[in-house]
Every structure is written in C-alpha cells, then in structure tokens.
Image (cartoon, rainbow, N blue to C red):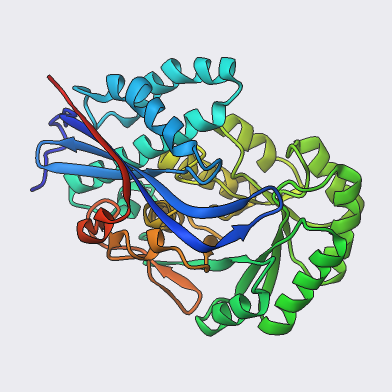
Amino acid sequence: MTVPSWMPLPIDEVRVRVFEAPLPDPVRMSFAALASRRACVVEIRSGDLTGIGESWVNHPAWAWRERVATLEEGAVPVLLGADARDIGALRRRLTARLLPLGRQWGAPGPVWQAISGVDMALWDLAGKAARRPLAALLAAPDGPDAPLQEVPVYASGIGPDRVEELAERAVARGFRALKVKIGFGEERDVAIVRAARAAAGDGVALFADANQAWSVPEAVRMCAVLRDHGVQWCEEPVDGNALADLEHVHAETGMPLATGENVYTLDAFTRYLASPAVAHVQPDTAKTGGVTTALAVGRAAAAHGTGFSPHCYSGALGLTAAAHVAAAAGAAWVELDVRDDPLRTELTVPPPEASGGALRVPSGPGLGVTIDEERAASRTVHSARWTAR
C-alpha cells in the first residue's frame, strides 16, 4: 500500500520492547564492561503500517529502564494521535517537552537517546508509506547520484582481549580497516596495537578508540605513541571530550581525531566540524538524535570537508539506519562491531550483511527490515504498548 503524500498518518499505537542477550565473555572498555547486549526498540503504528527504531541503552546496565520510563511518560503523550508524517514538528514538540527536563536532570544524553529511537521509527514509517528505501527518501532531490547500494565499514570491538583472533576474523571477512579498544595503560595499549597490526598486516588501516580514558597530558603522550605505531586516527582520547582539549592534543601531536557519539545537537556538532583537530565526526542514529540529526551532520561534514563516519555500537536497527544515512549522505566509514552480538545478527530479517569491507543497504521500504518475531521472543525482557483513544 502506498499512502498518498498529502494524507496524514495518525499515530494509533506506540510499542516499546527491550531485548537482551547475555554475553559469556563481557566486553571490556576503558570505563566499564558490557555483560549483556541490549536493544530498546520503538514501534510506531499508523493503520496497517509500523515503523521501527532503536534507542541506545548499552550503559549503564539499567539504562533500558530509564528509557522505557522516558518514552512512556515523556514521548508517548506527544506521539499518540499526532501525524507521523510531520517528523520535524514531532521532534520540536519532543525536544520542547523533554530537553528542559534533561538539563535539570543533568542528563540530556538519555533524552536524546529516547528521541533517537522515535525519530528512527518515524523515518522507517515514512519510507514504508512511500514504498521507498530510507536512503532514497533521505537523498537530496537535486543530488547528482542515486544513494549507494553499499557503504564502507570498518571493524570495531577489537581488544583489549582476543585481539589477534578478532583482527584475523575481520581481515578474513574482507574488512580493510580495524579499530582497537585502548585506554588500559600504555604498556597494554601498545601491545594491543602491535598485536592488531601483526594479525592484520600492513595493508589494513588501523584506528584506535580510548573512550575518553585520558587526561589531556596523557592523551598527548599516548597519541604521539599511537601515531608512531601507524594509527591513523584516535577516537575520544580526552576525558570530557571538550573541543579545546581535543584541539590541544591535535596541535601537540598532529594526530587526527574522531568524535561524535557523545555530542548532541547540530549546533554542537558544527563546532566540532569547524575544528581542524576533528578528522572524522561520528553521529549515532540510535543515540545522538536519530536519522534526522545524523543526516544533517553528514551534509554539514561534506560542506566542511570533514570525514563523516557514523558511530554504531548497538543492534541491527541502529546499524541498518546508519547504513541508509551513510548511503544518502556519503560516508568515509560506518562502524561495525565484529564481536558476537545476537541482537545484530538475529533480531531482524534480513540481518545486516557485510562482505568485502562493505555493508549492503537494504532495498525494501523504509529501513527494509522487520523484527524476527520468533527469535525475538526468547530475548524479550520488557514489552509495553499504548494506543490512541
């Protein structure tokens, strides 16, 4: 069914489900360990059409409970009965209602993560109503080319353990770039970088992610070390991620830097884009404002000549949305975690598929994927729905 563009899409129902997959071996990062994969999925129905989106809930372990509450009490009253087509108006209403609370709470991030899931679901619904892939819907109408059918990906999630195994697995799958997790002390970090390089060979690009592990002096010292070991860029080297600190590190070391997964609002992204310190900007479709913000950042990055490399450390929906945005806006890279993640490989039909260093962009309407209900059933830890009266 194609819904004429002039017809409204009244929101009849909102559903939120949380899926969980415990990990036999927790994933260690510089600030915490991830013991379970989780996905908070937002579903927005209008008539026979349902859009699906994902809200990032990796940390802390109880983040999904906050997200469900924010969506139920903050977002659902705005959504029910509203016209799903008017994504801009709904975002304005959501931000006007929720961001002042986020500021007082001292936690604007969770608010934006909730909005991200809603925004992604609305765009998926819009694509389904138009019977067009999301990438085609997002592409500039006067653009010279059709959206890409596949986008370049780099392998992330490598380190601090299983470095050789994961690097070799990534290279065998055709990845041409790897990103290692660091921030565990200089000796350990250097060992991680060396092990990844030895396993991957000289023809594979190497990036590093410190997850804001260092003070400015530590970042200066470590970025110089990483540069000498052939690391092409370092992600989030400084605690707090302040632009002035990143610029100091870059000026002292010459190391190109990457950031964006913890940057919120287009205005904030624009300040990072304007800096010579930031080589790659990394919005996250499930975290930093959804498809709308990621697309705007991608277009702004092109205008500034900055690399656009969407961050993704969530499930199948976040990765699929990132692929569509990257295809529409053009991207240097999209992040793809190569560690085992059932919520990436089993949650949707089709699952995201990467080969030869590229991720296929689904060609179906909207995101082009559906929830695999049979597999999802055993992963469900929360489910709630609300309907318009």
Q: Quadrant of residue 68?
A: top left
- Taking the image as shown, residue 349 lies to the left or right of residue 262, namely left
Instruction: Name the foreground residue: 336 vs 345.
Output: 345
Q: Where in the figure is residue 49, as x and y percent of width and height?
A: 15, 43
Residue 176 sits above or below residue 140 on the image: below
Q: Kindly tell me whether residue 148 is visible in this rendering.
A: no
Residue at image coords 61%, 37%: 263
Q: Where in the figure is residue 358, as x and y percent of width and height?
A: 47, 72
Instruction: Name the foreground residue: 259 vs 305.
Output: 259
Q: Quadrant of residue 7?
A: top left
Instruction: Name the foreground residue: 330 vs 303.
Output: 330
Most extreme residue toward the front, as rendered? Answer: 24
Q: Kindly tell me whether residue 282 is visible in this rendering.
A: yes
Residue at image coords 28%, 56%: 378
Residue 278 sits above or below residue 145 on the image: above
Q: Where in the figure is residue 349, as x and y percent of width and height?
A: 26, 63
Residue at image coords 39%, 52%: 20
- Taking the image as shown, residue 385 lies to the left or right of residue 155, namely left
Residue at image coords 31%, 53%: 136
Instruction: Name the foreground residue: 161 vs 293.
Output: 161
Q: Where in the figure is residue 96, as x and y percent of width and height?
A: 44, 16
Q: Quadrant of residue 66?
A: top left
- Taking the image as shown, residue 374 lies to the left or right of residue 166, namely left
Q: Quadrant of the C terminus?
A: top left
